[in-house]
Every structure is written in C-alpha cells, then in structure tokens.
Image (tube, rainbow, N blue to C red):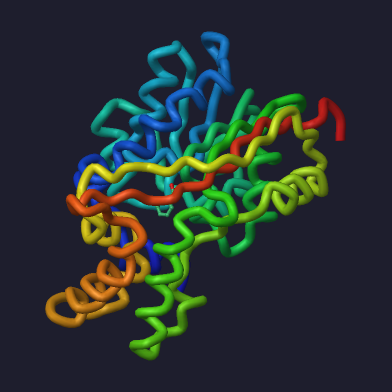
Amino acid sequence: MSRSAEHADRDWSAADYGQHAGFVVDLAADLVDWLAPPPGERVLDLGCGDGTMSLRLLARDVAVTGVDASPAMVAAACEQGVPAMVLDGHDLATGTAGTGYDAVFSNAALHWMKHDPDAVIAGIKTVLRPGGRVVAEFGATGNIAPIQAALRAEAEARGHDADALDPWFFPTEADYRDRLENAGFSIERIECFERPTDLPSDMADWLTTLARPFVMAFTAGAERDAYVCDVVERLRPELADANGHWHAPYVRLRLIARKPEQD
Ligand code: BEZ
C-alpha cells in the first residue's frame, strides 16, 4: 500500500487529538523558545498536525507553512488560519512545500516518519537555506515503551505482524546525532529526557486517538473493542493509579542542528 493510501485508511481525527492529546503541544510550548524566531523568519512546521503549534509561531510574526501527511489534520490547520498542505515528511526533498526556509520546526512528528529517517533528514536539508536550522522534539528510545509493548503483544497474539503495524521510530540520542552529522548538519544542542505525563482521559482514549495504525487493523466492533480492552488491561497495573488516573512514560529527544553555509 502506498504511504498516502495508508494514511487515508488510518487518518487522524483532529477533534479527538485536541481532546485527548492537546497536552503534547502544551508540554512542548518552550520548544518555540529553542527556535527563538526573529519576526519575519520563514519557518516550515513539519508534521504541523491541527496547526496549534504553528499558530504560536504566527503569533510571533513568523511566516509559517505547515505540512502534514494527514488530510484531516491539514484541514483543521487551514481552518485555524494556518497555511498548510498535505505532504509526507519523506517527500520534503521534492520541494513541493518550497525551499529556502530559515528553519524547519517539528514537534512530536519525526517519530511517525519511520520508513526512512535519513530521507526525512535529507529533505529537511533540501528545504533549508544555507545556514538554516532544524529545531525538533520527538519521541526517543523508551518513549511510551510499555504502551508500545502491549500494543505489539496483543496484536501478535491475534496473528498480526507487529513490525508491520508499529508506526513509530524512537531513536537514541546517539543514533539521531549520527544521522544528522552524516547528512552534514552540525549539532548545536541535543537533549534526551524523561517526561512522565498524566493523561487527561483514560488509556482507551489515548489508544484510539494516537495508536490508530494498531487499532484500525482490527474490524470495527467487537474485534477492535476486545483488542483495545486487552491492551488497556495489560497496562492498568503499571500505568493507572488506584483512582483510575492514567499516566504515560514519555521520553523526548530535543535538538537544534544547523545546515552548513556551504556544502
Ligand atoms: C509522542 O508524542 O511521543 C507520541 C504520540 C503518539 C503516539 C506515540 C507517541
């Protein structure tokens, strides 16, 4: 299946994302300070989602263009007034989203681009002007590890290929540093840190909103409900407290890397 067909099949719900995963943007709000964009800069928001983070950049008089692989998310971004287009991060090098950007900014998106992370980095380099920078936060090794393990185990128990369903790439700091340096970037800052996060709703909501490539592999109705329920019950002892409040062990990688003035 092509990547665009894959996305059409598993597309996001912008409303669900806002309700159950709004914290992803709130907790990374200071990533904008890492970018520290002077007014008038041209910034590409890679994996802009529903445009919430792009709006924060627009509020700083930045000329933002958003790209996202999800048509539903791009529609939501455009509704919020963010200039955005549907484009998979693997296809940045086509130049469809323009070139000569001062910066590429990306929050909670690069871990969805697992097919070829080096092609994504090459695309980022293509769209940046010489001396431009990439400022990004995404999941690192260990991110949501028990959730990913439970999703995989219950899928395998039902005869599915977990590697095929698993959409995420959570690299180590060393791995991602190497990839950037091999592409010619110089690392100005890189940090890996844990961010244990209280969830605003229950684990079933998190799964149906954020783990769609797993969940949508099961037929809607009893089969899908049983899958979600069994994943939830696997996780309850570790991730729910006595009052039924859930938390998730997020681990983040944050970085600033610069494209050379001359290649
Ligand atoms: C994350 O932001 O780390 C994330 C979001 C959705 C699914 C998996 C990880």
Residue located farthest toward the front when viewing the structure as drawn = 242
Q: Could you say which is closer to the camera, residue 139 or residue 6?
A: 139
Q: Is residue 85 above or below residue 160?
A: above
For residue 138, side relative to residue 86 (left or right): right
Locate residue 131 relative to residue 217 in the image: left or right. Answer: right
Viewer-side residue, 5 vs 207: 207
- Find the residue positioned furthest to the left: 221
Q: From the viewer's side, name the closer residue of 211 and 195.
A: 195
Quadrant where the N terminus sits is bottom left
When asked about the image quadrant of residue 229, the answer is: bottom left
Q: Could you say which quadrant of the image residue 96 lies in?
A: top right
- In the rendered image, which quarter is residue 102 located in? top right
**Residue pictured at 43% horizontal, 75% vertical:** 152
Which residue is drawn at the image coordinates 24% and 71% (left, top)?
228
Is the residue 55 above or below the residue 160 in the image? Answer: above
Q: Is residue 163 above or below residue 74?
A: below
Residue at the image position 57 percent from the left and 35 percent from the top: 98
The single residue placed furthest to the top in the displayed view is 39
Pick the quarter of the image with the C terminus: top right
Give x and y (percent) for residue 81.
29, 26
Q: Is residue 91 visible?
A: no
Residue 29, horizontal then vertical, whole percent = 43, 26
